[in-house]
Amino acid sequence: MAEKAKESAYAPYSGFKVGAAVLTADGKIFTGCNIENSSYGATVCAERVAIFKAVSEGYREFSKIAVTAMPCGICRQVMAEFCDKDFEIIVDNKIYKLGDILPEAFILPKEE
């Protein structure tokens, strides 16, 4: 599904299209693609699109994500907001653990 999502990417500046598919803890899948902007800071990565779509629909627990390219630091930090260190990131059929690729995530205590 990540490969299919990549087809919708809007990447007129870099030409680098990325797709992602995140799996919620209860088995629902949300997809995303990167969306570039001429003001580069406004660009959004595929992983964040997929996660933000899920969060906007009320989902907060995720088990894994498939991405067509290795996630950037911002995307790793977004994953750390919602996922534990054992969260699986699948890139090119290789599985990474979030805690291994972002060992010192910035996490504030959440209010109960």
Image (spheres, rainbow, N blue to C red):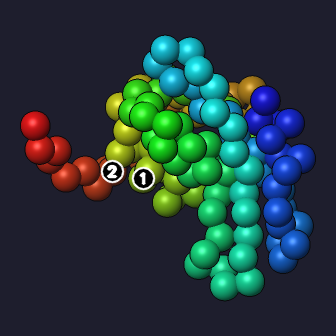
Between 18 and 25, the residue placed more toward the observer is 25
Residue with the most extreme left position = 112
- Label disc, if present, on residue 77 of the rendered structure: 1
Q: Nearer the viewer, mark 1 or mark 2?
A: 1
Neighbor class of circle 2 (other Cα within 10 Å; few <14, some 14-19, many 20+) is some
Determine which quarter of the picture holds residue 28.
Answer: top right
Q: How many marks?
A: 2
Between 95 and 26, the residue placed more toward the observer is 26
Vertical order, 48 against 55 (above or below)? below
> Image point 66% across, 80% down: which residue?
40
Which quadrant, please, contains the C terminus? top left
- Quickly name the residue at label 2: 105
Labels 1 and 2: the sequence-earlier one: 1
Q: Secondary structure at mark 1?
A: helix
- Amino acid type of the residue tagged 1 in the rendering: Gln
Vertical order, 35 against 54 (above or below)? below
> Image point 52% across, 53% down: which residue?
75
Vertical order, 92 against 77 (above or below)? above
> Image point 73% across, 70% down: which residue?
36
- Horizontal and vertical percent for residue 38? 74, 83
- Amino acid type of the residue tagged 2 in the rendering: Ala
How far apart are the alpha carbons under marks 1 and 2?
Answer: 6 Å
Q: Are marks 1 and 2 in contact (CB under 8 Å)?
A: yes
Determine which quarter of the picture holds residue 34.
Answer: bottom right
- Horizontal and vertical percent for residue 42? 60, 75
Between 24 and 68, the residue placed more toward the observer is 24
- Label disc, if present, on residue 60 of the rendered structure: none
Residue 111 vs residue 2: left or right? Answer: left
